[in-house]
Image (tube, rainbow, N blue to C red):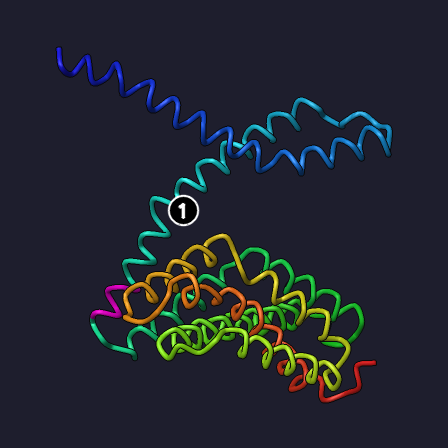
C-alpha cells in the first residue's frame, strides 16, 4: 500500500518536471522558429517545404535540447566541479595543468565544427593553388590546423587555471591577447586571417563549454580567497582567443609574413 501511495505522487511530480523541461526548451527555441517562420511566410511568401518532416524535426530538436540540458546538469557540470576540487585538494599543480591541457585538447580535436571548417579551408586552399590539390596534402593541412587549434585551447585552459590560482584579472589577459591578435593580423598572410578568426568561435563546443566552465567554478570555489563569480569564469574567453593567435602564427610559419591589407 505505501508503494502505491508513493507511486501515485511520484508520477505526477515526474510529469510536471518533464513538462517544465519541455516548456523551457520550447521557449529557448521559439525566437529561432519565429524568425524563420516570418521570413519564410512574410518575406519569401513560400510554404515550408516538407512541412511534416520540419515539424517532426523540430519536435526532435526540442526533446534533444531538453535531454541535453538535463544531461549537463546531471553529468558534466558536477564532474567538472568534482575534478577541480579533487585536484585542488591534492595540491598538485602539475597534474591539474596536465588535466586542463588534456581536457581542452581532447574536446577540441574531436569538435565536429572544427573538423568541418578545417576540411573546407583545405579544399579552398587547394582550389586557390595555395597547397597541393592531392587528397593527402589537403588532409595534412586540415589535420595541422585542427592540432594547432587543439593545442592552443589546451594551453588556454592551463593559463586559465594559473589565472585562477594567482588571482589575475581576466580582462588584462583578454585585452593583451586581442592587442596581439590585431598586431599579428597586420603581418599575417591574408589567406589565414579569416580562418584564424573563425577558429576562435568553433572551438567552444557543447562539451568543452560546460566542462571548462565547471572546472573554473569548482577550482575557484575550492581556493580560499577566490570568488567563483569573479574568478571562476573567463576560461571560455581564453579558449576562443588563443586559437586566433596560434592559427595566425601557423599561417605565418607556413605561408610567410605578409601584409594582410
Residue 218, above or below 137: above
* Relative to 214, 49 lies left or right: right
Occupied quadrant, residue 140: bottom right
Q: Which residue is drawn at 26% across and 64% down?
A: 85
Occupied quadrant, residue 44: top right
Q: What secondary structure is the stretch in magenta mostly built from?
A: helix
**The magenta stretch spans which residues?**
84-89
Which type of secondary structure does the marked residue at label 1 adopt?
helix
Q: Residue at x 20, y 18 (%)?
A: 6
Q: Residue 3 or 106: which is nearer the viewer?
A: 3
Q: Is residue 53 magenta?
A: no
Q: Residue 168 or 90: which is nearer the viewer?
A: 168
Q: Residue 109 or 44: which is nearer the viewer?
A: 44
Residue receiving disc 1? 72
Relative image position of residue 2 (x, y in whole percent): 13, 14
* Relative to 183, 91 lies left or right: left
Quadrant showing the N terminus: top left
Relative image position of residue 165 (x, y in whole percent): 35, 76
Residue 106, above or below 21: below
Q: Residue 146 or 15: which is nearer the viewer?
A: 15
Q: Is residue 87 magenta?
A: yes
* Relative to 197, 246 lies left or right: left
Occupied quadrant, residue 83: bottom left
Quadrant showing the C terminus: bottom right
Mark 1: few/some/many CA within 10 Å (<14, 14-19, 20+): some
Residue 77, above or below 32: below
Residue 161, above or below 23: below
Amino acid at each position: 500500500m505505501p508503494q502505491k501511495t508513493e507511486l501515485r505522487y511520484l508520477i505526477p511530480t515526474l510529469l510536471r518536471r518533464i513538462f517544465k523541461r519541455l516548456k523551457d526548451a520550447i521557449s529557448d527555441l521559439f525566437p529561432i522558429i519565429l524568425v524563420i517562420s516570418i521570413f519564410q511566410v512574410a518575406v519569401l511568401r513560400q510554404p515550408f517545404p516538407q512541412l511534416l518532416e520540419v515539424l517532426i524535426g523540430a519536435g526532435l530538436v526540442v526533446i534533444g535540447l531538453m535531454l541535453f540540458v538535463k544531461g549537463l546538469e546531471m553529468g558534466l557540470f558536477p564532474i567538472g566541479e568534482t575534478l577541480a576540487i579533487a585536484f585542488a585538494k591534492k595540491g598538485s599543480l602539475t597534474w591539474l595543468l596536465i588535466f586542463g591541457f588534456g581536457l581542452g585538447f581532447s574536446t577540441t580535436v574531436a569538435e565536429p565544427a572544427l573538423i568541418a571548417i578545417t576540411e573546407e579551408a583545405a579544399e579552398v586552399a587547394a582550389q586557390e593553388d595555395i597547397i597541393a590539390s592531392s587528397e593527402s596534402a589537403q588532409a595534412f593541412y586540415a589535420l595541422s590546423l585542427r592540432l594547432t587549434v587543439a593545442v592552443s585551447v589546451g594551453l588556454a585552459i592551463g593559463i586559465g587555471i594559473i589565472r585562477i590560482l594567482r588571482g589575475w584579472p581576466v580582462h588584462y589577459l583578454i585585452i593583451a591577447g586581442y592587442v596581439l591578435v590585431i598586431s599579428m593580423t597586420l603581418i599575417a598572410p591574408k589567406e589565414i586571417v579569416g580562418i584564424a578568426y573563425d577558429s576562435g568561435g568553433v572551438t567552444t563546443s557543447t562539451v568543452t563549454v560546460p566542462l571548462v566552465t565547471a572546472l573554473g567554478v569548482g577550482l575557484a570555489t575550492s581556493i580560499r580567497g577566490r570568488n567563483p563569480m569573479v574568478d571562476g569564469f573567463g576560461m571560455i574567453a581564453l579558449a576562443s582567443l588563443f586559437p586566433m593567435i596560434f592559427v595566425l602564427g601557423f599561417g605565418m610559419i607556413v605561408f610567410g609574413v605578409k601584409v594582410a591589407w
